Image (cartoon, helix red, strand yellow):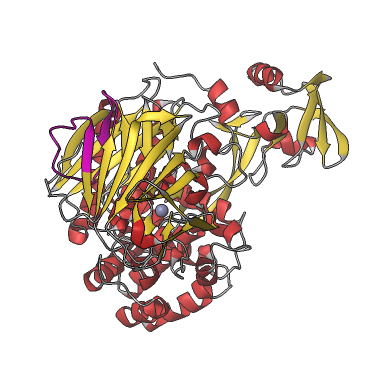
Amino acid sequence: MINKIGLFGKSWILGVAILVLQGCGSTKTLVSADKASVIAKIDLINVVDDKVNVVLDPAAFVTDTVSFFIPKTVPGTYSDDNYGKYVEQFKALDYKGGELKVEKLDDNTWRIINAKDLDKIDYWVNDTYDTEVEVSEPVFSPSGTNILKGKNFMLNLHGFVGYFDELEEIPYSLEISAPDGLEPVTSLVKGVQDVNRPETDIFVANRYFEVIDNPIMYSNPSTETFQVNDIAVTLSVYSPNGHYTAASLKAGMEKMMRGQKAFLGDINSTKHYTIILYLSNMDDNDAKGFGALEHHTSTVVVMPEQISKERLEEAIFDTVAHEFFHIVTPLTVHSNEIQYFDFNDPKMSMHLWMYEGTTEYFANLFQIQQGLISDEDFYERLMEKVERSKTYDDSMSFTLMSKNILEEPYKANYANVYEKGALINMALDINLRELSGGEKGVLWLMKELSKKYGNTKPFEDGKLIDEIVAMTYPQIEEFFKTHVAGETPIDYAVYWNKVGLQTTEQEQSTGYFFDGEVPYIDVDPSNDNAIFVREGIQLNSFFKGLGAKGGDIIKSVDGKMTNLVNIRLLIGQSMNWDPDKEIVLVVQRGDDEVTLTGKVGEPTLDVVKLVPMEGASEQQIKLREAWLRG
Ligand SMILES: [Zn+2]
C-alpha cells in the first residue's frame, strides 16, 4: 500500500479552500458457480440505516461447533483494523429458520454452537468511511468500505464476507444484488448469470484469499480501458461531483504504465489490471485516507476530488506506479508469512525494506529510467525522502521493525518504509552497480528472485538475506548486517559520491504560509478548528525569524483572533505584504501563551539539493548513468 499522508497531510480544509477548483468492467471468463461451497449474498438494494445485509450459506458442517471470522487484518495494510467491529445483528440460523446459540469471542470471531444444524448466517455491515472521523485509528480508506445508498459501494470484501474456521481454501460464490444503474468494477471473475435474477451479479473465487484480493466498486462509473503490451487495463473513476472522468486521466495513466512495463520487461505476467479510483468529496462521512492498496490484478486508489488536475495526476500516477510494482513484491516474491497469511493472527515478515522499500524505489527509478522525469526531479525526490526519513528513528533495525510492525515503538515508524525503505534500495542499487561494473542492480536482483520464487512459492523469511548475498557479492552481507538488520544509519553521501553527486544548501523563496501548494500551517478539526504551525517539516524564514515552533497554535495575528475565515483572508493579504511590515503573532505553546514579533521579511526556505559534482571522474559519471538509465 502507500499512504499519501505526506502529500496532503491534514491540510485539506485549508488546501481545498485555497486551491482553485478545476472545472470542475474488465474482461472476464465465465466459470460455473456449481463447485462453490460458500455462497455469500450481499444486498445493495435494500440498504437500511446505512447498513448492508449479508447472508452466508456454507455447506453442511460435521463438527459440533464452528468459528466464523471476519479479518482482523489483511495483507498490505500492516495494521490491525478489526473489520469485525463493523458487523452487527449477527445470527446463525438452522434449517427451520430458528436461531442457534452464538458466542462472540472477540471483535472478529463468532463461535456457533450446534454447527451441524447450521443452515446460514445473517448479519448487517456498517461502512468504515462513515467512522473515519470518530475513531482514533481509522481504517485506511483504500482498504475500507463505503455504503452510500444508490450511489457508491466500495466493497473491500474482507469488510463484508468472512470465512469459517479451516475453510479458507474452499471456493466462494458471491451473489450481489445491486440497484439499477450501478455497475460493478472489479478483476473478480464473473459466474453464470441467473436469467431470473437480472439484478444479481454472480462472481466466483477459488478460495477466500481471492475474495479479498479482488475489491469491487459499485457506482455509476466513468470507465476506460487500454492495452499496455499484453496487459488489458481498466481505469474506473468515481467522482461524486463529476470533476474527473476516466477519459481525462487515461492518457497520462497509459503513458506511465507503458513506462513501467518497459522497465520491468518480462518480469510480470499479469494479463489484466483494474484501477479503481475513488474520489472523496471530503464530507465528514467520506474517505480521508489518501493512497492505495495493492492486489494481484487490481488496486483501490482514494484521493480528494477537489484538487487541481496537475496535483491529482501527480498523486495518482505515483500511487498507481507503486501499487503496480507490488506485483513484483510482495505479490510475487514473498515469504511464508505472506503466502499463508493468517487474517486473524498474522505473523509479520522481516522484509518490509523489500515489499514496500523496493516497490517505492522502483516507482521513482522507472520514471528517470524511462525519461518521464528529469535528473533534477529524481534527485529532488531522493532528498525529500532523506528529509522525511529523519522524522523517524534512523537507528531502528529495519528487519526488527518489520517483524514487529503491529506493535509500538515499531508501528509509529511504519511510514519510514516509503522513505528510508526506498533509500536502502538506492544504496543497495548503487552498491550492486559498482560491484558489477555497472551491469547489475536491484531490478536485476528482483528478476532473479522472481525466477526462483513466485505466486505459490514463498521464501523462508530468515534466509532471504543470505540468499541475496549468495546471488551477489560478499560485500552485500556487510551492507545488510550494518544498515538493514543493524542499527547504523546510512551515510548517503558515501553512495552519492560513488556516482559523482553531492549535496549543496540553497536558499529558495517561498510564500509566507505556503511553499507552493504545501502549507506551513494546518487546521485541527478535533480542537475547534484551531490553526497551528505544522510539525515535522522545515519552516521558512518567516516563521523561523519570528521564533515560531511546530505545534504552536496561532491565537491571534496583529490583535485579530485567528479562525478559519480570518486566516484565509490573511493568506490572501500576505501576497502583498511589504517585507518591512511588522507583525505580532500570539501563539499557544503547551500551556503558555507566547507573543512573537518581528518583520515579515522576504520568506525563504533553506533547501539541501543533490547536484552533480564538479569535476566528477569519468568512472563516477559512468556509474551514475548505469544507475539511472541502465
Ligand atoms: Zn505499498
Q: Is residue 494 above or below residue 305?
A: below
Report x, y in % for residue 298. Answer: 29, 47
* Residue 610 in sight from this viewpoint: no
The correct choice, above or below, for 274 with respect to 249 in the image is below
Give the residues drawn in magenta, as a range.
178-202
| Identity of the residue drawn at 30% across and 69% down | 445
- Looking at the rendering, in which quadrant would you find the C terminus? bottom left
Does 504 appear above or below 134? below
75 or 481: nearer the viewer: 75
Number of marks: 0
Left or right: residue 293 compared with residue 404: left
- Seen in the picture, residue 601 relative to 9 is either above or below; the reply is above
Residue 3 locus on image (x, y percent):
48, 46
Residue at 71% from the left image edge and 18% from the top image edge: 566
Q: Does the stretch in magenta take in 547?
A: no
> Residue 92 at what x, y percent from top left?
41, 51
The foreground one among 419 and 155 is 155
Query: Which residue sits at x=38%, y=21%?
Result: 243
- Where's residue 499, x and y in %? 41, 62
**Magenta stretch containing residue 190, yes or no?**
yes
- Apparent side of residue 17 relative to residue 262 in the rendered image (left or right): right
Res 577 → quadrant: top right
Q: Nearer the viewer, residue 119 or 321?
A: 119
Tell me if 562 is positioned left or right of 275 in this view.
right
> Residue visible at 21% across and 54% down?
36
